[in-house]
Image: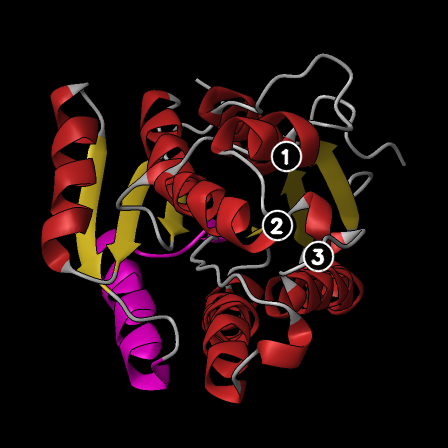
Amino acid sequence: MRLENRVALITGAGRGIGRAIAEHYGREGARVAVADLTLESAQEAVDAIEKAGGAAMALAMDVTDEVAVEKGVAAVVKAWGGLDIAVANAGIQHIDPIHKLAYSDWRRVVNVHLDGAFLVTREALKHMYASNGGTMLYMGSVHSLEASPLKAPYVAAKHGMLGLCRAVAKEGAEYGVRSNIICPGFVRTPLVDKQIPEQAKELGLSEEEVISKVMLKNTVDGKFTTLEDVSEMAVHLAAFPSAALTGQSIVVSHGWHMQ
């Protein structure tokens, strides 16, 4: 198993991409701290991990709450003696053109993605530095590297997470900490499913046209990226043995964006 006895914290892991990574980490031997907004949603993922033979714990964590992040990371370290891997995955979306975008909606999206990633990073690094090693992973997006209409706060936040990832790679190197960001294309999660009718209304398209002409237009095969595609990359990056792979944005998008 590639992550045997590693301790991993994953935010936003009650469903979607975060849960897929949590379950995959569990199968690979990691002890997984599943953090989500509610303890109930986190516990559902923990139950699935434990049913499959893995070890996990549930945490209620609002990543925009500084105290909640501090207490959550401390609880993981107290329970399992350290922290080897942290995945800043929590995220939300808001669809609006910039000229109609409320500042409160802008702040809400940026706060969850970018500020939340910072808070998790800061607390995780304290423990990783003390133990001389660790892996920070960020859930970016193809929108960390390019833009789409109607998603200004999401695009800005995801670009910011790429910068944070690279800063951590530079600062963390002397402490044995690697940092990378995964940049998926569209994955059929509840977050994406919610966007389809919203974009259809805003763009005057059918939902089928949003999928084919907007979301999958620039892929090489017209297919969504899968949860398994992303979780496999998260395992690979966490298990990678050296700093030869750090500060990198890894695109998982069926060719939507090619670096």
Is residue 239 among the parts visible in the rendering? Answer: no
Residue carrying label 1:
215
Separation (CA) of disc 2 from disc 1: 13 Å
| Proximity of marks 2 and 1: CB atoms separated by less than 8 Å | no
* Residue 203 vertical placement versus 157 (above, below): above
Secondary structure under the numbered disc 2 in the rendered image: helix
Task: Tell me, yes or no, whether the highlighted magenta stretch contains residue 63.
Answer: no
| Residue occupying image coordinates x 37% and y 84% | 66
Q: Is residue 72 a member of the stretch shown in magenta?
A: yes
Give the labeled residue for mark 2: 203
Q: How far across and how far down the image is residue 121, in percent?
A: 53, 68
Q: Earlier in the sequence, mark 2 or mark 1?
A: 2
**Residue designated by label 3:** 149
Decide: few, some or many residues near mark 1? Use Cα within 10 Å; few <14, some 14-19, many ≥20. many
**Quadrant that contains the N terminus:** top left
Does residue 164 appear left or right of residue 85 in this picture?
right
Q: Is residue 36 above or below residue 45?
A: below
Q: Secondary structure at mark 1?
A: helix
Q: Nearer the viewer, residue 187 or 236?
A: 187
Q: Which residues are magenta?
A: 65-88
Q: Nearer the viewer, residue 255 or 149?
A: 149
Quadrant containing the C terminus is top right
